[in-house]
Image (cartoon, grey):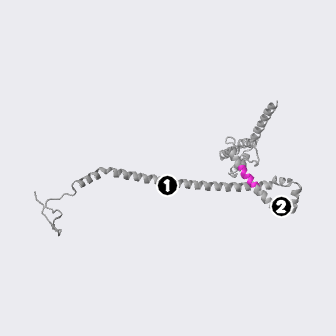
Amino acid sequence: MGEANTSSSSIDDDLLLKTFYAEVSEVERDNEVTRILSCFKLNAFEYLNLPFDSTPEEVKKQYRKLSLLVHPDKCKHPQAKEAFGALAKAQQLLLDPQEREYLVNQINAAREELRAKRKKQLKKDTASKLKSLVDEGKYEQEYEKSEAYQQQLKLKVREILTDQEWRRRKMQMRISEEEGRLKKDEAETKEMWKRKREHEEQWEGTRENRVSSWRDFMKGGKKVKKGELRPPKLKTEDPNKSYVQRPVKKG
């Protein structure tokens, strides 16, 4: 019985939603496209126009609502397709556990910064401080629900996300530079070994000529031409070690 009621309720919701969008004017569709495309690109909650504490189910429901509003088949805005894609990406990020956790962590960091700032302000404002103590925290809870606080939180989240993205890009740049340096070193090393191998191959290629020249040298050395004088021989019996020059016999 409960399942039947739930199913009936879902059908009624779908019918109401379709009826609503049938009555939506083209101006409203165009305005929504403009809003989506002007959103802060690093915060998926802004694209879907959702509070930061929205559940996955609320994300799905809001995506369905907005995607029907700016669907390229329904909306004549020239950038409707781009807005539709931005919504799809925002939903994907918010339904991904890791991406959602990262974003929620940055939002919590923004809240902590604002609370610390608020605490300092209360020290100067005695009346607000006393009211906060009397209400046992309810005063601060009400403050954080205010439009002023929500706007401050939105801006602080943007600031933190921008800073994190800048750090990420700088790190990626350093990694890319290091990878480029390593590739350059690798290329230079390969070129060095290539030149060394080519030199060794050239040296090996002239081995036979070198061996042949050495053998010829060892056999007779330099041949004496006809008519040339031989180097003088030392007479061992000559105590004065005189040198005698003998002519070379002609054939």
- Image quarter of the C terminus: bottom left
Pointer 2 residue? 122
Q: Depth check: 246 or 147 in front?
A: 246
**Could you tell me which quadrant the N terminus lies in?**
top right
Q: Residue at x 43, y 52 (%)?
A: 193
- Contact between marks 2 and 1 (CB within 8 A): the answer is no
What's drawn in magenta, residue-wise?
103-111
In the figure, is residue 244 to the left or right of 185? Answer: left
Q: Is residue 76 visible?
A: no
Which tag is nearer the camera, tag 2 or tag 1?
1
Between 11 and 237, the residue placed more toward the observer is 237
Task: Give coordinates of residue 65: x percent, y percent.
Answer: 74, 42
The percent coordinates of residue 156 (x first, y second) are: 73, 56
Q: Is residue 194 above or below residue 7?
A: below
Q: In the figure, 13 relative to 170: above or below?
A: above
- Sequence order check, earlier mark of 2 and 1: 2
- Residue situated in front as seen by the camera: 169 or 214: 214
Q: What's the mark number on residue 185?
A: 1
The spot of residue 198 in percent (x, y) is: 38, 51
Secondary structure mostly taken by the magenta-highlighted segment of the chain: helix
Please say whether residue 25 is one of the residues in the magenta stretch. no
